[in-house]
Every structure is written in structure tokens, then in C-alpha cells.
Amino acid sequence: AQSVTQPDIHITVSEGASLELRCNYSYGATPYLFWYVQSPGQGLQLLLKYFSGDTLVQGIKGFEAEFKRSQSSFNLRKPSVHWSDAAEYFCAVGGNNDMRFGAGTRLTVKP
Amino acid sequence: DAGVIQSPRHEVTEMGQEVTLRCKPISGHDYLFWYRQTMMRGLELLIYFNNNVPIDDSGMPEDRFSAKMPNASFSTLKIQPSEPRDSAVYFCASNRQDTDTQYFGPGTRLTVL
């Protein structure tokens, strides 16, 4: 069965610092992988997705993620965090019929 | 495009009352999903439709929950009777078959007293 693990429940970084959010997945075939962001009181917004091809994926708001098959990981990165990036981030695996979401990582940004 | 539209945004009701949540998917999308988000259980898929037909409702918690999609532009999720443990944020999402990318609505925050 497919599943997603986000090991970090809560991360705090200083504004301007780099960020990496971890995501590990379990999937029987080549996965479709996603990162979504949820601001307080809002729905989930797609940041980026990986279906195939280049394993380094660029997304919106300056985010990128790298698919590493050998590590079953799809970590999200940003070189310099802005205060507006404070939100909850969800990694997801699957496709139309069976999308599984991780528990989420809450990001706090210190001034 | 206006995106996925959900109403109401907030609903407060008393235990035992019927609650109806509404969703309008993005035009042209042929999949529609209903999710529930709680602190304890995270984001759970309740049911999804393809071309207005329910495909998998295994995530619907109990018979008190029902969902319909009478046409391509409208779906409802109904809870009758509601209970305090149904308090959660309910999201609707839609996508096109050829994209595999779900687009979420803003959610309905349901509080059952």
C-alpha cells in the first residue's frame, strides 16, 4: 500500500535562511509526487509535482523538490525563506484514484 | 477560472441537525473528491466521483454521510444526523483525467455543538 511520511511535525527557521522539508514515500510503482501548501484558513495550493523526467522539479514561490528513487524521498527546498512562507506543507503520493497525503509539516518563520 | 468553489465557508450547527456542504468543481474537470481534515487524522479522502458517478466511497465514515453529484458542476456532502465528532474542515477538490493534479477549494469549517 502506498503511504507518505513527513518526519518533521514542526520546523522553525529564520527569515532568509534555507529550508528543507522531508518527505518519504512507499509506492509499488513509479510514483506521482506532489507538494501542497496550506495557509491558515485556506485550502491546499499545489507547489509542484513530479511525474517523470528530470528529478529536480521547480515549483511556484521559489520552491523546488528533488525525487530520489534510491531513498524513496521527495524533499522540498527553498534557498531563502520569506515570512509569507509560514504555513503547513503537505507531501502527497499517487494519482487520480488514490492520492495519499502526509500528516503535514508546520513551518514557522522567525523574523 | 474561479477555481473550486465551496459553500458555506463556515457552518455551526447543533448535534442531530442535518448539514449540507456544497461544491462547484472547476469547469471541464471530470473528477471530484471530498476530503475531511482533522488534527487527529489529517487529510482523509471520503469519496470521489468520475463523470458524476461515485467510484469509491470506502472513506465515508458512516451511513450518516452521503454524497451526490447530480451534474458536472455541482456536488453535495450531507451529514444526517450530525455529531460533535464530525467537526472538521471539509475540502472539495477536482481535476481532469489527463493531469492527475487535484485543485482544492477553500474548505468548509464545520462545528457541531
Image (tube, rainbow, N blue to C red):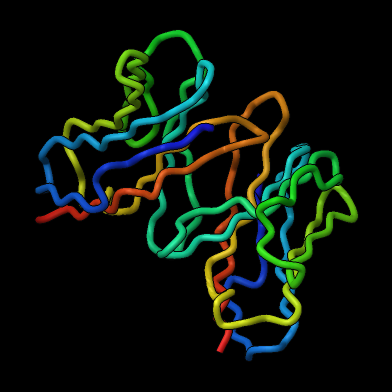
Q: Residue at x 39, y 49 (%)?
A: A103
Residue occupying the point 89% across, 51% down = B71
The location of residue B79, given as percent across then percent down, is 72, 73
Q: Residue furthest top?
A: A53
Classify residue B71 as left or right of residue B62.
right
Q: Position of residue B10 (x, y in %)?
A: 57, 76
Position of residue A34 in the picture relative to residue B48 (left or right): left
* Front residue (pair A8, B69): A8
The residue at 40%/30% (across/down) is A25
> Residue A20: which quarter of the image?
top left
Residue sitting at the far right: B70
Left or right: B50 in relation to A14: right
Q: Tag count in the figure?
A: 0
Pick the front one: B54 or B107 = B54
Residue B53 sits above or below residue B5 on the image: above
Name which residue lies at 36% across and 19% down.
A67
